[in-house]
């Protein structure tokens, strides 16, 4: 059965389902990372880091966040592969990254049937990037807030 035989709204529903799966996976990764950071905070390990240790820890967190975003985009490319959207894998990856960070600036055309793909990728980028920013803000808050010993 081809995608063309499905009702017009089917691709939109598939995009919404892919959004739910990929954003949930990203959230689980963030939760794991936040759990590690929280455990270090509770033990006081973040406050005991030297300056180079702080830099290395922040870089490690940023690399893990980068990996989560990379995995999310590769997940979108995998969804496009399974759905038969775009012919080449490099086009799928490019389309995913381009829409993850900005809506409507793509030079790749997926056709009218898959027009909901760009907004779903963009919405996932908005949520995932905002959550990652929150994790970093929380980390910096704990690293650089002066403890109240009063």
Image (cartoon, rainbow, N blue to C red):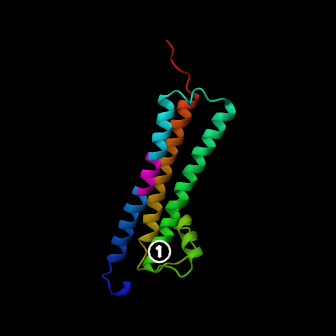
Q: Is residue 27 magenta?
A: yes
Q: Quadrant of residue 11?
A: bottom left
Per the image, label 1 sits on a secondary structure element best described as helix
Q: Which residue occupies 39% across, 69% down?
A: 15
Q: Relative to residue 127, is residue 59 depicted above or below?
A: above
Q: Quadrant of residue 20?
A: bottom left
Residue situated in front as seen by the camera: 53 or 93: 53
The residue positioned farthest toward the top in the image shown: 150
Q: Relative to residue 34, is residue 103 depicted above or below?
A: below
Q: Which residue occupies 50% across, 38% down?
A: 37
The magenta stretch spans which residues? Answer: 25-31
Q: Which residue is mark 1?
A: 80
* Residues packed near mark 1 inside 10 Å, few (<14), some (14 to 19) or many (20 plus): many
- What is the x, y in percent for residue 25? 42, 57
The residue positioned farthest toward the right in the image shown: 52
- What is the x, y in percent for residue 130? 48, 49
């Amino acid at each position: 059965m081809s995608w063309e035989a499905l009702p017009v709204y089917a691709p939109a529903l598939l995009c919404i389902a892919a959004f739910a799966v990929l954003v949930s996976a990203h959230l689980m990764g963030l939760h794991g990372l936040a759990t590690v950071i929280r455990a270090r905070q509770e033990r006081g390990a973040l406050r005991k880091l030297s300056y180079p240790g702080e830099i290395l820890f922040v870089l490690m967190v940023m690399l893990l966040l980068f990996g989560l975003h990379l995995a999310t985009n590769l997940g979108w490319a995998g969804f496009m592969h399974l759905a038969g959207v775009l012919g080449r894998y490099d086009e799928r990856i490019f389309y995913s990254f381009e829409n993850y960070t900005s809506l409507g600036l793509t030079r790749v055309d997926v056709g009218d049937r898959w027009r909901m793909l760009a907004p779903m990728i963009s919405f996932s980028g908005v949520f995932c990037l905002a959550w990652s920013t929150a994790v970093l803000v929380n980390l910096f808050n704990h690293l650089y807030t002066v403890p109240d010993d009063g």
